[in-house]
Amino acid sequence: MTSSENARVIGLGIVGLGGATLSMLPKFAKNAGYKIVAAADIDKEVMAAFSHDFPEAKTYTSVQDLCTNRDVELVYIATPNRLHSEHALAAFAGGKHVLIEKPMTIEIPGSIAMVEAAEKAGVFLGVNVKHSFEPRVQKVREMVRTQEFGKLRLINSWRYVDWLYRPRTPEELTPEWGGGIVWRQAPHQLDIVRTIGGGLVRSVRGMAGVWDPDRRVPGAHATFMEFEDGAVATAMISGYDHYDSRLLVFGPDAIDPSQHGGARRELRDSLAGGAEAAAAAAERYGGNRAGSAVRETPGLGGGWIMGGPTVISFDHADVSFSRNGLEVFSDTSRYEIDLQGPKDGRDGRLDTYHDAIVNGTPLPADGRWGMATLEVLLAVQESGTKRQELLMSHQVPGVD
Ligand SMILES: NC(=O)c1ccc[n+]([C@@H]2O[C@H](COP(=O)([O-])OP(=O)(O)OC[C@H]3O[C@@H](n4cnc5c(N)ncnc54)[C@H](O)[C@@H]3O)[C@@H](O)[C@H]2O)c1
């Protein structure tokens, strides 16, 4: 039983009621260890919709004001990437713990300031890399740790998706504000890779591709990583809305062929001019497209697990993510490990955070861990520009 089921209740303040919060809110709401006591957003319509649904929660238009609320113990920050540092520092100044959306921020000095401010205030900083807490990822990490199939050798992760052409906010289409697929999608994927591999990435050679002159933001990446112990990983995402890699995991019937190119079509036919930003804004709390960006996959509590194949090679087995959990292809046999259950990675993230606050257990995916993933994200882009491998210097091991 996790401490959140025993439940000392942690007062939660939410900052930013967009797509990320829509996917986390049901998890906070049903977790007995948390109570939503406050929320802040600069968008008055969004706040009004939230107040309607959570009349007992206090609402604010400023993060700083929310952080003066004594009932708030933990602040979940889900504002645009370029504001993460500023908002986290405001929470630490108020003596609050922080759960920050990924990436924790978009430059190393900001991440160092966040880590130091949390330590100075004596509070926790955790990063919401929820997929790294998925049962599949945790189970593979256990295999690495126990050496059940020998040494970890290779991790491969592929994803082909329509990300670039779904309605995007200006933030998401501006690289220096933390837009593009490397900042928005690769944090999950590369964090999963680091979690499985133990965290200590030695070097990175990557590239971020900007291929569409009408959307000048990275829409694809391909990355090779080597861990300190010699294990290696490759990871790629293409968001250009051609192939859909869910076909490789869920089979040919998983996707209706008539949906092909749907995101490009909608963008071209109905979202010209300002209509795209309005459609993206309508995906926030209370909007008429709310929830459309929350992608679920059958099984495992509905958790979404990056939508493409991930295969992990050991000395004596390859293990792949499957519909119901993991499929093991060992020296002698092939079998599935069914990991379906009521909890997914979001639950895992919240349970481990509750355990850290209430019982003092080490917090996985803390600020230093988030900074290490940030370093890899920056290296994907920089090594692509320089066309050379980069050595890492901010890596930390995971909490096993
Ligand atoms: N964990 C996940 O699966 C996941 C999913 C989506 C997004 N994200 C991350 O969550 C963050 C937010 O992304 P999103 O897609 O929800 O964005 P969004 O644009 O949909 O929502 C952001 C919200 O923050 C509000 N906001 C902006 N400036 C503010 C300020 N100064 N004070 C208070 N509120 C402010 C906006 O009004 C909006 O409601 C990003 O870091 C993103 O990478 C994570």
Image (tube, rainbow, N blue to C red):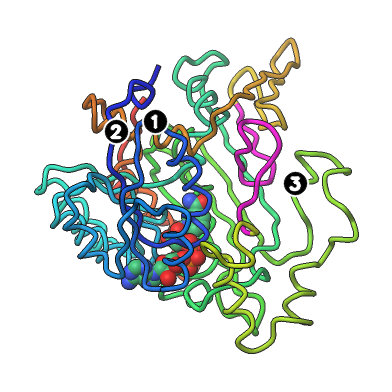
Residue in view at x 57 percent, y 80 percent: 216
Q: What stretch is highlighted in magenta?
A: 293-313
The Cα–Cα distance between marks 2 and 1, rounded to whole angstroms, is 7 Å
Residue in view at x 71 percent, y 31 percent: 322
The image quadrant that residue 362 belongs to is: top left
The label nearer to you, 3 versus 1, is: 1
Q: Residue furthest top?
A: 332
Label 1: which secondary element: loop
Q: Which residue type carries mark 2?
A: Val
Magenta includes 217? Answer: no
The x, y position of residue 235, in whole percent, is: 58, 49
The answer to whether residue 80 shows anywhere in this view is no
The x, y position of residue 155, in whole percent, is: 58, 37
Label 3 vs 1, first from the N-terminus: 1
User: Ligand 1 is in which quadrant of the figure?
Assistant: bottom left
User: Which circle marks residue 316 in the picture?
Assistant: none
The answer to whether residue 69 shows anywhere in this view is yes
Residue that numbered label 1 is attached to: 32
Residue that numbered label 2 is attached to: 9
Say whether marks 2 and 1 touch (CB < 8 Å).
Answer: yes
Residue that numbered label 3 is attached to: 246
